[in-house]
Every structure is written in C-alpha cells, then in structure tokens.
Amino acid sequence: MQVLKYYFLILQAGLCLFACNPDEPETEPGTLNPADTITVADLDNFSDYLQFFDATKKPGKSPAAPAGSTLKISIKDTLYLVGGLEMPIKFLHRDTTKNVAGAYIQVVSMVGGGSLATYFYDVPEITEVAQSDTVSVVSVGIDWDGLKGFLGVPPAGLDKPLTFDITVTPYDETGQPLDETVIPVVLDDQRDSRELGSGSCPLVLPEGEHWKWDWSSTQIGSRTTKRSDPNTIIGGQYINGCCVDGFSNYSATCKPPYVRLFFNSYYHAAYESIIFKADGTYSRITREEYANPEPGKTNFCGSGPGEIEEKTFIQITKGNWAMERNVSTPQSLRDYRKDFEKVDYLRLTPTSVTPLGGFIKTRGGFIWQNPCPSPSSFDAKGALGLVTPAGGGPDGGDNQLDFKYFIRSKLAGSNEDEWFAFL
C-alpha cells in the first residue's frame, strides 16, 4: 500500500507537469500500474496532516461556488509547502462588497473521474489582515514529519516531491462561496542550499529585480504565535479623558468619571526590499506606516474617535552579505525539525543605517527554503525563506523561531503582477 501511495503521488506530479508545461511531451503510457488508484481513505490521510492557524473540520463536500468572480488569488498554479510552516493564500477583492472572510479547503484527486476527502476545512481569514479593505489571507501548512511517518520509505529511485490537489473556495461574511479553484500542492524539503550564493545559484538578481518581503511567522514550540505580511495592520486603543461642563480635558487635573474614547492608532510594516550585489554588499529599504494617538488634541466631550497623527518611516540599510556553509543549528531549531542539524546560514552585516530606529529587522538567518531550481521540476523557484532563532543569530536563544519569506520581484512591476485570476 505504501508503494501504491507513492505511485499516486508521482502520477499526480506527471499530470501537473503536463498541465503546467504544455510544450513537454506526455508521459509514456504503461509506466504506471493502472491498478494503482488513490482511495478516499488515502485522501483523508493526506488531509489529516494539513495544518492551519485556525480551522474547523466539516463533513462532506465543500460548498459549490459560482464561476466568473473578479477575485484574484496569490497562487499562480502551485502551492509549495515546506514542512512545519504555514504558507499564505491571499485573495484580492477590489470590489469591497465581495470581502473574503475565509476559505473552504478540501483535499481532492484529479486522477480518473476524481474523488475527494470525506471532509473539508473551514479556514477563517487571519485576523491581523482582516482590517484591509481589499486583501484577505488564510494559511495552510503540512505536518511533514507526520506525513513521512505515514507514507514510510518510498520505493527506490522515486525522488520526486510529494504532491496532491486541494480545492480552495473563498467565502464572504455569511459563508457564501464566491469562487473556486483547484491548486496542486507540492511538498518538498528545499533546505538544500549548497549552491545558493554561488555562480550557479546567485542571490544577485538581474538589474531591476529584488527580493521583496512577503510573509513572516513566529513559532514557539509547535505553536504559531504571530504572523504578518505587508497587508497586516495592528493597533487601535481606548484612552480615558474628561468632559467637565462642556470642556474637554486631558491633563493631570482630569478625574473620574472618565470619558473613554477609541483611537484608530495603528502600526503597518508596509514594505521591505533587499538587493544583493556581486561584490558581497547589499542594500535594503523598509517602509513603516503608523498613527499615534493625540489625546491632547481630542474633544472628549464628543463621541470620538480620537485624533491621531499619521507618519511614514523609510529606512535605508547598506552592508555586507556572506553565505556560511553547514552551520550547526541551536537546539530550538533541532527541536523544530529533527533533521535541521547543519544548515547554511545567510549572514547580513549592516555597515550603515539611515535613519536609525524602526522595527523591521533582517540580519539574515538559516536557509529553510532555497529559491533556486534543483533537479526537481517542482521546486519553488524565486522564493527565499530564512529562519532565525530568538537572539537574532546562529547561536539561538530560547525556543522562539522567526521565519521570514521573500519573493523574487521586479522593482518596476505593478502589484497586479502578483495576483492571478481564478481558473
């Protein structure tokens, strides 16, 4: 049965390759045993190893959705998952009446007549991004070690990554489906970065391209405690003041009974870009947007909200980069992944920071996702993942791990270039 499962995965991989690369010849018939078919029980097993920040299992088939919406999705054709870390699926809804409140996700088989798992997941959007009027985000991950334990050792010679399909059905605030697409999911251990930073796999990109921050996640033990992306906005607070005889007061003379007003203060890590140069230097630009409360300028005799002052902070960092090979990992990283014993480490050493301050920090990290092509046709090209133990360096600290994910992007490209229509 274990061999059967691997044959199914390879069959899926071959079908996806054919679908994604129409110029390639179709796989020769007869290379797979026709009797090797996937079962509903197998689909349920794959589904059991999916991981979500927050999700509810529901029996049956996920609700059907109409076609032809104006929604766009951040996944072009394939979702690449690295074990133990949830990756984002983002939805763009320019029509603010079509807000996405979550997504139904179900494991399916596109082989033969098609079949599906006996249940699906109801995955709400990530609350930190919910304040955005036009972007919603859900996340999905895989228990890589658990899945490998279930599958056992693959037959000799089968070196392709594992793959299966999921349906993704975004829904609105009432749970009504808005659209649906089928996405191949590819699981691969992409930590092999031996060529990263070399001539065959440069971090140095062509002129006009850069590495753009796309996603961050903080893990403490097996728990995801924080996640963010350029659409995440946090903030909002209540402040007490006074209204005495029709006069607003926010000073040391203000005494109970207080007037409590809400202030739309916020913090937004809006942008981070890194450009690596062939001479071993790098440049980095970050943009942070925030609003501070102004209680002294607020009328506490009114109904609110309170006054705020909005600001933008742009920082330019220059420094040196180096790829350190086979660095021993701290215990926190080995606890997270047993095979993370020696991993390549990208070190960033700033030489100038203008102006000082700011909260967005990137000092490098262990490579957990390799952006370069490998012998596998399914490797996630153009995605650089770093993981940094607490303490900000390779020696680590406690059991907190900070993951950061960058995508290869064009400096002059439109944001629309990163969104794709539902198919």
Image: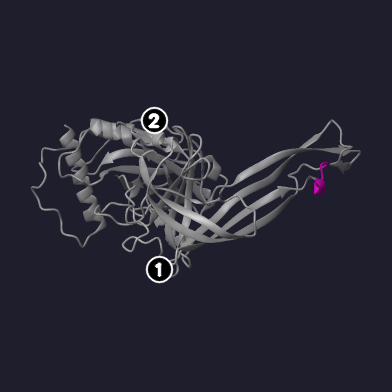
Q: Image check: 398 left or right of 18?
A: right
The image quarter containing residue 165 is top left
Label ID, residue 358: none
414 falls in the magenta region: no
Q: Tell me the residue that label 1 is attached to.
A: 206
Amino acid carrying label 1: it is Pro
Q: Where is residue 84 in the image (x, y as percent from the top left)?
A: 38, 38
Which mark is in front, 1 or 2?
1
The residue positioned 32% from the left and 56% from the top of the image is 195
Please give the range of residues in magenta.
296-301
Callout 1: 10 Å neighbours few (<14), some, many (20+)? few
Q: Image check: 107 left or right of 246?
A: left
Question: Dot 1 lies on which element?
Answer: loop
Location of the N terminus (image quadrant)? top left
Prevailing secondary structure class for the magenta stretch in the rendered image: loop
Residue 70 visible somewhere in the drawing: no
The residue positioned 20% from the left and 46% from the top of the image is 159
The residue positioned 32% from the left and 49% from the top of the image is 192
Q: Where is residue 245 in the image (x, y as percent from the top left)?
A: 91, 38
Q: Tell me the residue that label 2 is attached to.
A: 57
299 falls in the magenta region: yes
Residue closest to the eye, 66 or 335: 335
Amino acid carrying label 2: it is Lys
